[in-house]
Amino acid sequence: MRHYCTLFDGGYALRGLLMLRSLMRWDPGARVTVLALNDAAARLIREASAIEVWPTDFVRLVSVGCLLPYFPTLPQLRATRSHAEFCWGLASMLLVERLASGDVRQDEAVVYLDADLVFHGDPVTLWDRAAWASVAIVPHQFALEYADRESTSGRYNVAWVMLRNDDAGLACARWWADRCVERCSRETCGDQRYLDEFGARWTGRVCDLDGSGIGLAPWNVHARKLATNGAGIPTADGQEVIYYHLHEWAPTSPFRRTLGYPLSEDAARLIYEPYEAAYREAEARYGGLLK
């Protein structure tokens, strides 16, 4: 069984829905736990679960309350942190809950996903590459001109993090969550810069998931040659694009694609335009639930 988890509020709920749709296309037998951060997000997922063409047990909806047995100081954190800082700390805590819940069996794994991903290829490729590992994380793979951003954003991107239900995976989840309880701010790039310590702390148990088709994002897409293969799947430097991270994309009018990163015409045509068409459709169908 492949387990995933994600989280979002009403502001990201339609993006989260599109991520779930794209994941279901490639991994319909998966189980996804969705942490809804407010009533609007919960309403949308309940409605979508009744309408979307996905298995009835594909999505499991939970609230922040499920984290309280493991992190009793959450109410204090919510009261003292900005909304962004509070949300940044929840991914690691959700992974702790998932691994401790009994739903993820011994030696199975769970993957945390950011809501603003879209899958273009089969994520099982990543699971297979990390089959030996207790932890799997994805480097930013910054284009050369943005390499200096690693010093502030970290080597790794938090959009995909796999932790296995074994000794190292459990220890990593708890260590990461505890650090986020202590501090989760812009100085730590939220929860993200803590990922840089995983390899040294769990030597030989961490898999780096790198490659042109993995972790494609605004900070590296312009340095890749984009095309499509015979199945119509986007490729980057000849490798199938597994997922794209729509970092900085926003549903403004017109849509905001990035805050300064260059995008090629191929990226616009193959990645952004189909996503924006899907977003318009989802907004027309579900947008009223978010008001």
Image (spheres, rainbow, N blue to C red):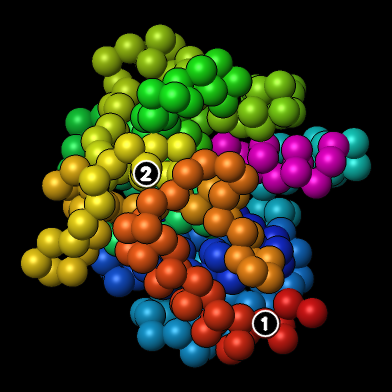
Q: Residue at x 30, y 27 (%)?
A: 208
Q: Residues within 10 Å of mark 2 (few under 14, many from 20)?
A: many
Q: Are marks 1 and 2 in contact (CB under 8 Å)?
A: no
Main SS of the magenta part reads helix
> Residue 163, position in %: x, y?
40, 36
Boundaries of the magenta span: 81-100
Label 2 is placed on what type of residue? Val
> Residue 259, position in %: x, y?
62, 45
Q: Tag 2, which secondary structure?
A: helix
Q: Disc 1 versus disc 2: distance between alpha carbons? A: 30 Å
Q: How many labels were placed on the picture?
A: 2
- Relative vertical location of residue 178 with respect to residue 267 in this rendering, above or below: above
Question: Which image quarter is the N terminus in?
Answer: bottom left
The reply to whether the magenta stretch includes residue 96 is yes
- Relative vertical location of residue 227 with respect to residue 129 in this rendering, above or below: below
Q: Which of the two residues, 188 or 205, is positioned nearer the viewer here?
A: 188
> Residue 165, position in %: x, y?
37, 37
Report the side of 9 relative to 273 (left or right).
right
Tag 1 residue: 287
Q: Is residue 252 visible?
A: yes
Q: Which of the two residues, 204 or 158, is positioned nearer the viewer here?
A: 158
Q: Which tag is nearer the camera, tag 1 or tag 2?
A: 2
Q: Which mark is residue 221?
A: 2
Q: Residue furthest left?
A: 230
> Residue 105, position in %: x, y?
35, 47
Q: Residue at x 66, y 32 (%)?
A: 190
Q: Residue furthest right?
A: 79
Q: Is residue 175 visible?
A: no
Label 1 is placed on what type of residue? Gly
- Relative vertical location of residue 83 with respect to residue 270 in this rendering, above or below: above
